[in-house]
Image (tube, grey):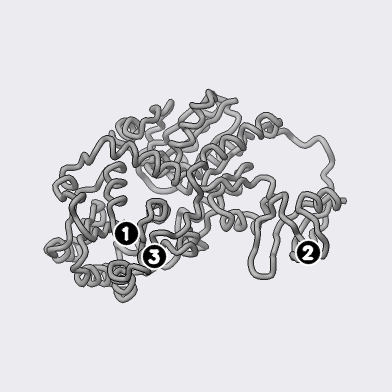
Amino acid sequence: MKIAIILGTRPEIIKMAPIIDEIEKRGITSCLIHTGQHYDKEMSDNFFKDLEIKSPDYNIHVGSGSHGKQTGLMMQGIEEVLLDEKPDIVLVQGDTNAVLAGALVASKLHIVVGHVEAGLRSFDITMPEELNRMAADACSLMYFIPTEESAINLLAEGISRKKLFITGNTVVDACFRHLEIANKAGIQEESLANLDIENMDNILTLTMHRAENVDDKERLLNIISALKELKDMNIIFPIHPRTKKTLENFNLFDELNELDNVHIIKPLGYLDFLILTSHSTLILTDSGGLQEEAITLDVPVLTLRYNTERPETVSAGGNILVGANKNNILENAEKILNDEEFADKMKNAKNPYGKGDAAIKTIDAIEEAYNNGLLDIKAPENIMSSFDRKMIKINEDVSVKEFEENENALVHMVFDGEKMIFPLNNLNLKGMMITYDVYQ
């Protein structure tokens, strides 16, 4: 068996590192394709070395550009590699242009696509990431899903439950793996090392990069106004170059930089940033991935957004959406700082993304599919059977598997009267309302 892995950005490399590890541990042949979506020396060379994973077998060197141009160049380069390598399955992770390109090309070549971190939905189609993840899911045949909630999103879109594997999120595996590497190496960035965070109290780590915040002066003013009043917190802000430029254009950079409790530093490498977040009292961010890392590291997070494709972190109690509302930011930040019970509840929120064994579960599922011949995509040899889609309430003791065998059916959605439930094989359906396909 040969597994091809397509990577384009730093978060993809971070989250796929545990899977790459697991593939190598089992002696499975692999092919690592880096699109070069974020191409620089760190991304192409040092970053893989820092994370102690092998260098890519191919680097397409796409670089930056418009969505269309970038995706088109990726597709061309990925197609050439896949035609040469002929993998049994292609893994893509997340929601970048590399994911879109890889999923489209592999599916057109009749290669099974496995989508790692499938099923996430913000339900905001103005986000490029939302379109990418939806398109990738449309091309996939194996879905490696972080949570039951994300699995239910895919069931609602008509995907068969038999293609869905609730593995947890590899971000948990990655955080544990990489924090160990980071602590071993120590802080590398001088601007962070000089802050002596080991002996600093009440650290608030701030990140902002999304256009809806950074390009909106009113939102920036609200956020900065809140930061001015958080005088009891040491605010550490590894500033993105684009964010810095926008703040300067709005004449807001100096105003923020002159605050005694605000420490604006250079952008950090991933390992240094992981050390910083692990020492934080609070994270204030508009990042998606950082919401996952925060709950994994038991750090309360306030998200500077009005929606999230990580709603499980909010439901679990480790994340609060505050938008760019000054009062929301201040009220919740001060409660985390001054209300021990409130802070402990956020810190101890149950991680919805699992225990750190997502990579093992993912490769287990792929090996089982390969051994059962399910990674061979062939044209159908039998005439398609028709089916009726039905909905009924189940009144007897019967499991999902038993119902499907008895009725020659496929269960889709299960509702227990209060919430949707993922239809695992051994789930007892008594008292449940279900939708299902029954085959003629």
Residue 5 appears in the rendering: yes
Q: Position of residue 386 (x, y in %)?
A: 84, 51
Residue drawn at x 54%, y 37% is 360
Residue drawn at x 74%, y 57% is 428
- Element type at marker 2? strand
Direction from residue 207 to residue 254 in the image, left or right: left
Pointer 1 and pointer 2: residues touching (CB < 8 Å)?
A: no
> Which mark's residue is nearer the viewer, 1 or 3?
1
- Element type at marker 3? loop
Q: Amino acid at mark 2?
A: Met
Residue 391 is labelled as 2
Q: Which residue is mark 3?
A: 305
Picture layout, residue 122 above or below residue 37: below
Circle nearer the N terminus (1, 3)? 1
Residue drawn at x 38%, y 59% is 347
Circle nearer the N terminus (1, 2)? 1
Residue 355 is labelled as none
Tell me the distance, in whole angstroms, between the alpha carbons under discs 1 and 2: 44 Å
Residue drawn at x 53%, y 43% is 116
Q: Amino acid at mark 3?
A: Arg
Q: Which residue is mark 1?
A: 283
Direction from residue 31 to residue 165 in the image, left or right: right
